[in-house]
Image (cartoon, rainbow, N blue to C red):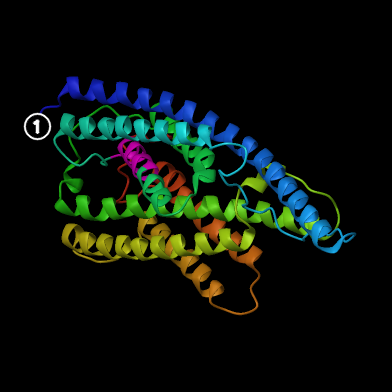
């Protein structure tokens, strides 16, 4: 099989183009968070003023300020439409189309699925992450995640082109199987879903800290968090996505075992990649168990979810690069060489 260098070069150009678009979207999403905080302040002040006037009109001298929460109170009713968020989302869609184009042209350049090494996995997984984010915000307005998602995608693409880049080439014989399409594609989608759950867990911890300080009378910190939902809602959203990601990761583990039996004649061989894929599964299983068990605080549950994602990142980076075994298909030269 020959490599189409024209398509490979076009893919590289599209990757850099997508990064440029994502960078602009990242900045606009960040500014939207700041403006969202200000909109909450204006909306809350307006609501209190109108409530006070109503009470004065009804009771003559009674003035009361309702104890309402500003968490996640950003609306488009006051302070104008979220113009920056809309522009940022439109740019994210544009970036996603360019990004997907990069993945497709990479696949065409080698005439196979574009996830045969760490570089290809990175550009494909980040494309799926962006696509998953755009699908999720259709059902629920989670544009407050835009800064994190575009930022994380930029990091993945940056690592891909700087640290993981591998020229387009034919697969090693062990990967020339239809199971590559099944096993790795499920892992890609699972990783994308778990990344969004991780982002929600981090925001949940930040929001919890802010809420506790306000409740304890210690003053407000990180005011930009006014523009996102409260910690309870964030935790619920993270749980739903983590549950989906866990199911997908389970299928990844099962598909990998079946592929191993067909390739090497055994379902399990305690290879480093197999072990760490199972470790990831165990951590997320522990998270789901803790979530369903009384006595665990929402904070500790979020910490477990973050540990789970850290194990995913470790599995992809450290294990692929530094651990040697039957799954050593990163496409990179050995660090010891």
- Indicate the position of residue 30 as horizontal and vertical percent values: 58, 34
Position of residue 28 in the picture relative to residue 263 (left or right): right
Position of residue 85 in the picture relative to residue 161 (left or right): right
Magenta-highlighted residues: 117-130
Which residue is located at x 23 percent, y 66 percent? 266
Which residue is located at x 23 percent, y 60 percent? 260
Residue 85 magenta: no
Q: Quadrant of residue 255?
A: bottom left
Position of residue 54 in the picture relative to residue 289 (left or right): right
Looking at the figure, which quarter contains the N terminus? top left
- Indicate the position of residue 311 as horizontal and vertical percent values: 49, 54
Give 174 or 302, whichever is nearer the viewer.
Answer: 302
Q: Quadrant of residue 27?
A: top right
Q: Quadrant of residue 129?
A: top left
Residue that label 1 marks: 1
Residue 121 magenta: yes
Give 287 or 178, whichever is nearer the viewer.
Answer: 287
Seen as rendered, the residue at the extreme right is 61
Q: Is residue 230 above or below residue 9?
A: below
Secondary structure of the magenta portion, mostly? helix
Which residue is located at x 39 percent, y 59 percent? 277
């Amino acid at each position: 099989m020959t490599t189409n260098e024209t398509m490979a070069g076009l893919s590289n150009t599209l990757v850099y183009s997508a990064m440029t678009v994502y960078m602009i979207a990242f900045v606009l999403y960040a500014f939207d968070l700041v403006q969202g905080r200000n909109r909450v302040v204006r909306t809350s002040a307006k609501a209190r003023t109108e409530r006070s006037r109503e009470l004065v009109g009804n009771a003559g001298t009674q003035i009361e300020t309702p104890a309402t929460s500003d968490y996640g109170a950003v609306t488009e009713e006051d302070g104008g439409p979220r113009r920056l968020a809309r522009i940022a989302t439109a740019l994210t869609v544009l970036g996603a189309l360019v990004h997907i184009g990069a993945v497709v042209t990479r696949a065409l350049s080698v005439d196979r699925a574009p996830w045969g090494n760490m570089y290809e996995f990175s550009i494909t997984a980040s494309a799926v992450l962006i696509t998953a984010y755009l699908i999720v915000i259709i059902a629920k307005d989670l544009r407050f995640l835009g800064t994190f998602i575009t930022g994380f995608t930029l990091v993945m693409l940056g690592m891909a082109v700087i640290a993981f880049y591998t020229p387009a080439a034919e697969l090693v014989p062990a990967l020339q199987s239809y199971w590559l399409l099944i096993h790795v594609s499920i892992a890609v989608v699972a990783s994308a879903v778990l990344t969004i759950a991780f982002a929600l867990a981090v925001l949940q911890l930040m929001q919890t800290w802010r809420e506790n300080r306000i409740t304890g009378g210690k003053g407000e910190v990180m005011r930009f968090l006014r523009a996102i939902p409260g910690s309870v809602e964030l935790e619920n959203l993270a749980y739903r996505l983590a549950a989906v990601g866990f199911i997908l990761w389970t299928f990844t583990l099962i598909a990998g075992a079946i592929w191993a039996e067909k390739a090497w004649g055994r379902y399990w061989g305690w290879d480093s990649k197999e072990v760490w894929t199972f470790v990831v599964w165990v951590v997320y299983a522990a998270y789901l168990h803790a979530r369903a068990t009384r006595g665990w605080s929402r904070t500790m549950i979020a910490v477990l979810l973050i540990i789970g994602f850290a194990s995913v990142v470790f599995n992809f980076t450290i294990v692929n690069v530094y651990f040697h075994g039957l799954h050593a298909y990163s496409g990179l030269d050995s660090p010891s060489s």
